[in-house]
Amino acid sequence: MRQCRYRSEDKAHVQHVLTAIAVNLERIGAHLPTTPERRPRTPTALQDYLDQRGIARPRSWRVVTHPAG
């Protein structure tokens, strides 16, 4: 950073230290290996049952709306 946000020497030092930490974390992150993509989970027996019968299964059971009546 070219300009310091603070006027006091102590606060300016803290800003410089935090800026240096942020720059170093960016540099470290550039050298870390990328994580492989996760494989999808194998379907449960219930999900297989629904798929075999062509029954749509919602992404979450919490969003299922029950018909009024």
Image (spheres, helix red, strand yellow):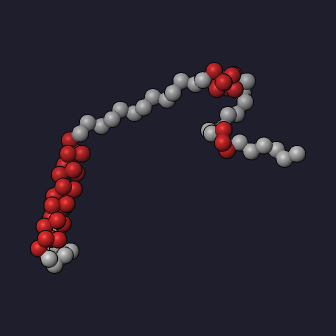
Choose between 9 and 54: the one closer to the eye. Answer: 9
Could you tell me if residue 2 is visible in this image? no
At 19% from the left and 49% from the top, the residue drawn is: 27
The N terminus, quarter of image: bottom left
Please state the horizontal and vertical placement of residue 23, each as a whole percent of the image. Answer: 19, 55
Q: Where on the picture, by quarter, is residue 5?
A: bottom left
**What residue is shown at x 49% (from left), y 29% (from top)?**
40
Tell me if residue 24 comes above or below residue 49 in the rendering.
Answer: below
Q: Residue furthest bottom?
A: 7
Residue 24 vs 66, above or below: the answer is: below
Quadrant of the snapshot with the C terminus? top right
Vertical comparison of 33 with 22: above or below: above
Q: What residue occupies the far front of the structure in this picture?
A: 10
Instruction: Give the number of callouts.
Output: 0
- Let me know if residue 5 appears in the view: yes
Q: Position of residue 56 (x, y in %)?
A: 70, 33
Quarter occupied by residue 21:
bottom left
Could you say where residue 16 lies in the image, as x and y percent from the top left? Answer: 15, 64
Q: State the residue at coordinates (72%, 27%).
A: 54
Residue most extreme to the right:
69
Q: Is residue 17 left or right of residue 32?
A: left
Q: Residue at x 51, y 27 (%)?
A: 41
Q: Position of residue 35 (x, y in %)?
A: 33, 35
